[in-house]
Image (cartoon, rainbow, N blue to C red):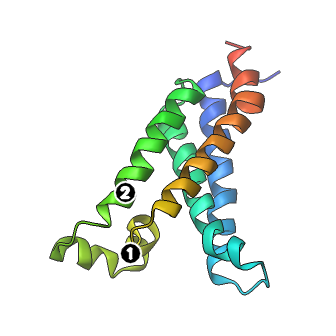
Amino acid sequence: MNTLPPSTRRRLTCLAIMLLLIPLGFACRFVPLGLPYVIVKYGGSFFWASTVYWFIGYFLARQKPLTLALLSLVITAAIEFLKRVQSSTLENIRNTFFGIMILGRHFSYTDIAVYWIAILCMLWLDRSTIYGRSASKE
């Protein structure tokens, strides 16, 4: 019998998924796996947005998946639009590895579309498996 509260189980699930997605995203972007161009080009963005969803889910474990998805959609789009802002502070951040991974360099509407597709996939996954299972136990 599982004695952990549902929110703790949800946080652990979110953490486990993030720990899976992050290396997959790095591998997709940096390891020459011979993947099709479209996967190499947009796979990292897909994994990044997916990670954002589970990151938010980790901190807001009691929220419904739709709330997490809406927050994720807004945050990923805001970060993408932040690429249009040119300041010395942001450029200094973007010149670091983590700055490139989190903020990126070049604005793209296509990236926003990929983020939203990824988040909708995570919403579907969360609602159909993870959240539905933990919500029924509360």
The tag earlier along the polypeptide, 2 or 1, is 2
| Three-letter amino acid code of the residue under disc 1 | Arg
| Quadrant hosting residue 44 | bottom right
Q: Is residue 30 above or below residue 136?
A: below
- Nearer-the-camera pick, 108 or 137: 108
Measure how far apart labels 2 and 1 are at the Cα level: 11 Å
> Is 37 left or right of 86, judged from the image as shown?
right
- Nearer-the-camera pick, 90 or 22: 90
Can you give x and y, in whole percent of width and height, for residue 84 in the image? 28, 66
> Is 51 left or right of 132, judged from the image as shown?
left
Q: Is residue 50 above or below residue 43?
A: above
Give me the residue at 67% from left, 25% from top: 4
Can you give x and y, in whole percent of width and height, for residue 54 in the image? 58, 44
Give me the residue at 62% from left, 63% from top: 22
- Nearer-the-camera pick, 73 or 21: 73
| Quadrant hosting residue 9 | top right
Query: Pointer 2: what residue?
Result: 79
| Three-letter amino acid code of the residue under disc 2 | Ile
**Quadrant containing the C terminus in the rendered view:** top right
Query: Pointer 1: what residue?
Result: 105
> Is 64 left or right of 24, judged from the image as shown?
left
**Quadrant containing the N terminus in the rendered view:** top right
Can you give x and y, in whole percent of width and height, for residue 60 in the image? 48, 32
**Which disc is residue 130 wearing?**
none
Give me the residue at 44% from left, 37% from top: 71
Circle 1 sits in a helix, a strand or a loop, which is it? loop
Discs 2, 1 touching: Cβ within 8 Å: no
| Quadrant hosting residue 88 | bottom left
